[in-house]
Amino acid sequence: MPRRSKLDTVKIAFRNSKFRFGFGLLMFFIIFSLVGGIFTPFSGDGLYYEQIPNTTVKIATYSQKTLPPMSEETLITYLGKEIKVLHILGTDAFGKDVYAQLVQGLRTSLWVAFLAAIIGTILGITIGFVAGYRGGWVDEGLMMFVNIMLVIPSIILLILVAAYLSARSPEVQALIIGITNWPWVARAVRAQTLSLKNREFVALAKLAGQRDVKIIFGEIMPNMVSYVFMAGILQFSGAILASATLDFIGLGPTTTVSLGTILQKAIAYNALQFGSWWWFIPPGLIITLIITALFFVNLGMEEVFNPRLRRGGE
Amino acid sequence: MGFKKYLARKTGVYLITFLFAVTLNWLLPRLMPGNPIEGMMAQAGTGGVNEALIEFYEKLYGLDQPLWKQFVNFWSSLFHGDLGYSILYRAPVTDIIRHALPYDIVVLLPAIALSWLVGNWLGAIAGKNKRYDRYTMPIFYFLASMPYFWFAMLLVYFVGVELGWLPYQGAYDPSTVPSFSAGFVLDFLKHWILPFLSLFVVMIGSWAIGMRNMIIYELEADYVRYLEALGGSEKLLTKHAYRNAILPQVTGLALQLGLMVAGAIATEIVFNYPGIGVLIMNAALSQDYFLLQGAFLMVVISVLLANFLIDIIYAFIDPRVRASYTEG
């Protein structure tokens, strides 16, 4: 099979409409999470901070009003200044700006999911690879472990661990999601390794006397890159969902806002009953759209790498 | 003869998984930093941390014994049905869970079964019909991407609050007493509809996607082409493709169970539906570790049992598994 250069693959991927749609949507949210804050004077926790002259101290201005989207409010700051501010997506029950929290929350959620996906994918690749390449009892033992981890619902492990940690940073959350999410990757990578390691080019490399490490990174890995990338994307969407669920139960990061914690606060302070739809619809919609986008990226990539799946005229 | 072997092997695998899960349940709290006794005392409001009291509690919970003894004790009390005492609810954990479990079953079981049937049906149509596929696929993907609890919140807001059609808090009106009267059953059903619907609708998405992909794949397979060449009707082709496509969907049922449990836990919290999900949240937030461990165990056991059942069903419906165990 002739090797396609990586650039060609990327070009073909971008010709695929599903990939373009998913990738574009994903990029939009990533950029939004990074620069969305410049459209609002509020800081990430939804409060307006004012710098006290000649010091580094910043003091927040609190207001108690729950306002609908696009409403203006006049804040009287600590120093007595009157400032007119616009709440793009209104405020929550504590008078905090929802839009500012949303930008910060999105950044946290993406960061958690990214870290968790990296951790889970690396763990999964390593374990799946060792199992598939070594074979024998190593394979049996590892696969037994993988199957056990697959059956035990990971959310329940996450809850158990998170409940024992009184202070949780996004990074800790990512770590515990990563170390429970890997079995899927391990299984997929093992299957790929099994099918690759008996191909002619691997046998040839072995005959040529190459060392295992060189065979793994020189012959087998390059043929799995697309596969691993797709597994990583699935990990990412799984991690977004897992972290949102964990946050929603009340076990989210204690140090910052995330999409899930916004939803948790909304439920806890009766946003549904008071009809503050701007508080709970946007965060959930963003989660849904991100996962949809990842689905489409994956679909597009599947079609690129496996032309049989393409359905005429695409 | 052969089926017995299959059954024995599966039982063995699930036993090992059970052992592992229980050990994890015992080990994890001991690996975590911090002293749970202090946390529990702070929650119980016994007025600060007191050395004598800590010693008393450590003795009470057997934490002063060597680790291996603690492990043995853990198993022995487990087999006596003793999961400890919940500080939050001030009742034995076993009793609390026994009261919560029926609510989970009543919502989850119909939601999973019906969504599986409806989802597979819709997915099969999408796999066969290109025009229909074009419009429904984005909807299925959107559904499958939705966090269960967010869709539940939308239902509460639009159907419960804005339209006021259905109740959305608890499993029944708190002013009524549970009984088998017509009035109570009706009230119970009314409270049941929204939690059920929120799980059911979201689940449809992933079943439909799986089925649609399988049908497309099977319709391209050689045996279908051969049948087509023989002049088989389209109905016959679809029937054969469907039979092969449904098998992975049964396996999918087992694999999706974990995600569904996660969804159900969060959904119950939205509706304040008194199942295991609400228990888990309350236990986690108030550091009621016995209740948390008990709930963990209950969920693991249920999921393992469900997996086991699915494996047995699978052996009956997949001729390949049947054959490999009856011939060999």
Image (cartoon, coloured by chain):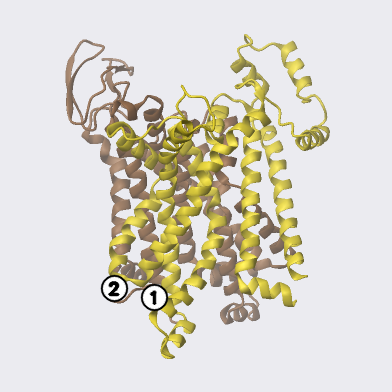
Chain colours: A brown, B yellow
| In the foreground, A142 or B228 | B228
Q: Residue furthest front?
A: B182
User: Do we see residue B220 in this rendering?
Assistant: no
Position in image of residue A138 (x %, y %): 72, 62
Q: Residues within 10 Å of mark 1 (few under 14, many from 20)?
A: few
The percent position of residue B119, horizontal first and vertical second, equals: 42, 58
The structure residue drawn at horizontal position 39% and vertical position 73%, both measured from the top left corner, is: A309
Q: Which residue is at the front of the view, A115 or B318?
A: B318
Give the position of the C terminus of chain A as an image quadrant: bottom left
Query: Which chain is disc 1 placed on?
Result: A
Q: Is residue A6 above or below residue A38?
A: below
On residue A307, the disc is 1
Distance from disc 2 to disc 1, alpha carbons, whole Å, reads: 10 Å
For image coordinates 42% across by 30% down, the residue present is B169
At label 2, counting other C-alpha atoms closer than 10 Å, the crowd grade (few under 14, some 14-19, many 20 or more) is few
Instruction: Compare marks 2 and 1 and give the one earlier in the sequence.
Output: 1
Along the viewing direction, whichever of B281 and B159 lies nearer the viewer: B159
**Relative to A252, is B279 on the left or the right?**
right
Lateral position of residue B235 relative to residue A18, left or right: right
The residue drawn where x is 31% and y is 15% is A55
